[in-house]
Image (cartoon, helix red, strand yellow):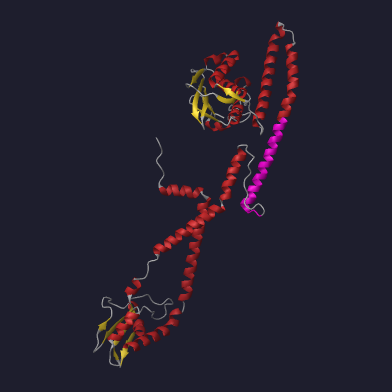
Amino acid sequence: MSASPLPWYRRAFVALRSSLRLRLVLVFLLLAMGMAFTFISGAQKAFSVGWREAARPLLMDYVDRLGGEVVVGGTPSVERAQALTQRLPLTIAISGPQVNWRSHPDQVKPQWKRDRPRSADGDGPGWGDEQDWDRLLLRTTADGHRIEFGLNDAAFERRPKLIGFTLTVLLLLTLLAYLYVRRLLRPLDDIRQGAQRFGAGEFGQPIPVRRPQRPDELGQLATTINTMGHDIHQMLEAQRALLLAISHELRSPLTRARLNTELLPESEDVAAQREALLRDLAEMARLISDLLESERLAGRHKALHREPTDPVVLAREVIEELAITQPAAHTVRLFTAPALPTLPMDRVRVRLLLRNLLDNALRHNAGALLPVELHLERVDVGGEGVQIQVRDHGPGVPEDQLPHLAQPFFRPDTARTRSAGGVGLGLYLCRLVAQAHGGTFSVLNAKPGLAVTVTLPPA
């Protein structure tokens, strides 16, 4: 049963929490909005102090000039008032003994005479008080007419609506900020990928550094990680060289010890000790051979001796060889797809791969009701390739230990005895053989048991 998807706001929160870019853009936006609000509020407060008193005489003088333009011979002129309202966004109301006229009868009250709060300082009447507006915007002619001036609301209602344009510009600026932050933090992706390559043992490609002559903080971090990867690579190479040297040096005394053991008399009192010593020496010889083979495959100059090989014939040969020393190998069930392709592969290395996979499965399948299974199937990996899968029906491996199974000298159960398992080189060698052929290697729990899958491409 699949889990229900998270709501959009939860997904947005998870994306914001896991993305440094989005958090930086959000911080920039909040900072810009806070600075804009603080600046605008402070500017309004600063300019509102005293500007009314400074503008009062200018407004009174302007209204006096408007009244003088409307009045002709002491009497208001409707024609002049109409011409004035057509030229300026004003409303004019004339009332008196001879002329009663309003330029905008739909406006009940002039805009400037509507109720407004008192002055900011709270002393005396403000500009919103009726008495103050009468004194500023009302003029009386000599013949007793009253002329009231106001603002034309319709002219201001026709002002362009810039909300959509403002939002578009804001979104565009946000997008540009995100793209810039993304470009600024792009080296983090290179650092992450480089760290993953170093963790997988690939030291050939260092992390790219922008402007290596004058790197920024992220460039300095990439340079430091490259230096660390180079040092680790050198230590691993020194360890590999030491391991190869020791393995080569051990072969000669091991050969002499085996020869001396075989020359012991085959009497009954030393036969058991002689056979046990020969088994131990054979195990040591195989361990040294596996070490040398693993180092050859892990080196940069590994060479494969490819030749056309039938995987089915090779699998049967390996099962028959194992059956000589392990009778349980007779029970291995071989499943093959019809007409498997013949591939160019290194027969010795692939034989080693099959032997290690089957040997590992047979050891851990002891006591299981079902036998070990070997599946050979055709796969399409840039051409017709072969997929090899070996499965046992044993107890399996804890999930947290699966990624470590193909590492050298790793064993899931550290407390088991030598008789219950090897030294931890079998699956490591199988992975190296698969990678040397350009293939893949994977391990998963088959429940019950463990399934190891190797894919070999055509070439």
Residue 163, visible in the rendered structure: yes
Instruction: Kindly identify the residue that appears in the image at 28 percent across and 78 percent down.
Output: 104
Asked if residue 220 is among those painted magenta in the image, a careful observer would answer yes
Magenta part of the chain: 214-242
Q: Residue furthest top?
A: 268
Quarter of the figure with the C terminus? top right
Towards the viewer: 107 or 222:
222
Residue 150: in magenta span: no
**Residue 395 in view of the camera:** no
Residue at 36% x, 75% y: name it. Answer: 116
Position of residue 358 measured from the top left corner of the image (x, y, whole percent): 56, 21
x, y percentage for residue 311? 54, 22
* In the foreground, 168 or 3: 168
Indicate whether 327 appears above or below 105: above
Foreground of the two, 110 or 72: 72
- Residue 31 position within the rendered picture, expressed as x and y whole percent measured from the top left: 51, 60
